[in-house]
Image (cartoon, rainbow, N blue to C red):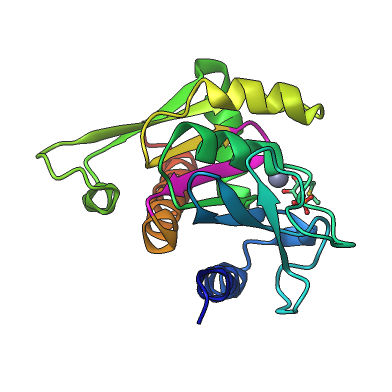
Amino acid sequence: MSILVQRWNELADVKDELAGRDWFFGTSGNLSIRVSHDPTTFLVTASGKDKRKRTSEDFLLVDANGNPAEETILRPSAETLLHVKVYGKTNAGCSLHVHTIDNNLISELYGDKGEVTFKGQEIIKALGIWEEDAEVSVPIIQNHAHIPTLAETFDEHIQGDQGAVLIRNHGITVWGRNAFEAKKVLEAYEFLFSYHVKLLTLKNQLQIS
Ligand SMILES: CSCCC(=O)C(=O)COP(=O)(O)O
Ligand SMILES: [Zn+2]
């Protein structure tokens, strides 16, 4: 099986799993997986599709600038430039972007601070941080309808082959060394967001500070 087909199947499997979690509301979200280094090519989701469906037109191959690398009628994700930034700056192998209620709530609650920090949670180990009382912070950037502007702001927060950035009232983009790692990072952060939102809600209902 060619590398392209292997990567296609890997990304299709990740897409199915995230769809199973109902993380693709209203065609939102986009996913990509690196196919080659030097030159950089990656598969990215076609724009505007229902990502809960598995079809032969789900992904297209693009170059380092996010332009189709082969003749196609498909349009790359409107947010391909963010994936371009990840592959251009790191050795990451996969980048995932989803809009969930919890990541939107956290981005709005902590947006003015520019980041959100979590500590004292066992799931932080899924991010590869094993110290006692570890803390983890996620930067929160402003949303921009102009994707080149959004991508430039996003770019400032890309450090290393694994990471995450929240886009205020929009969603989260994570990346990792491969599809397994990127999905693990995404699931760990969504766990932290969901836990935090529920805890704040309960504390408010019970009037606990
Ligand atoms: C339908 S949500 C607005 C666009 C967006 O934020 C998104 O994640 C999906 O866009 P795409 O072009 O990748 O389908
Ligand atoms: Zn989006």
Q: Is residue 52 above or below residue 166?
A: below
Q: In the current view of this chain or complex, which residue is farthest to the top?
A: 113
Q: Is residue 114 above or below residue 98?
A: above
Kindly report the secondary structure that dominates the magenta region of the rendered protein.
Answer: strand
Residue 182, by quadrant, is bottom left
* Residue 141 appears anywhere in the view: no
Residue 65 location (% of width, % of height): 68, 37
Residue 34 location (% of width, % of height): 52, 54
Q: 133 left or right of 153?
A: left
Magenta segment range?
Answer: 167-177
Q: Residue at x 70, y 79 (%)?
A: 54
Q: Does the segment drawn in magenta span residue 170? A: yes
Residue 130, by quadrant, is top left
Q: Residue at x 48, y 39 (%)?
A: 204
Q: In the current view of this chain or complex, which residue is farthest to the bottom?
A: 1
Residue 39 location (% of width, % of height): 55, 45
Q: Is residue 200 above or below residue 75?
A: above
Q: Nearer the viewer, residue 153 or 2?
A: 2
Q: 157 left or right of 171?
A: left
Q: Does the segment drawn in magenta span residue 192? A: no
Residue 23 location (% of width, % of height): 62, 61
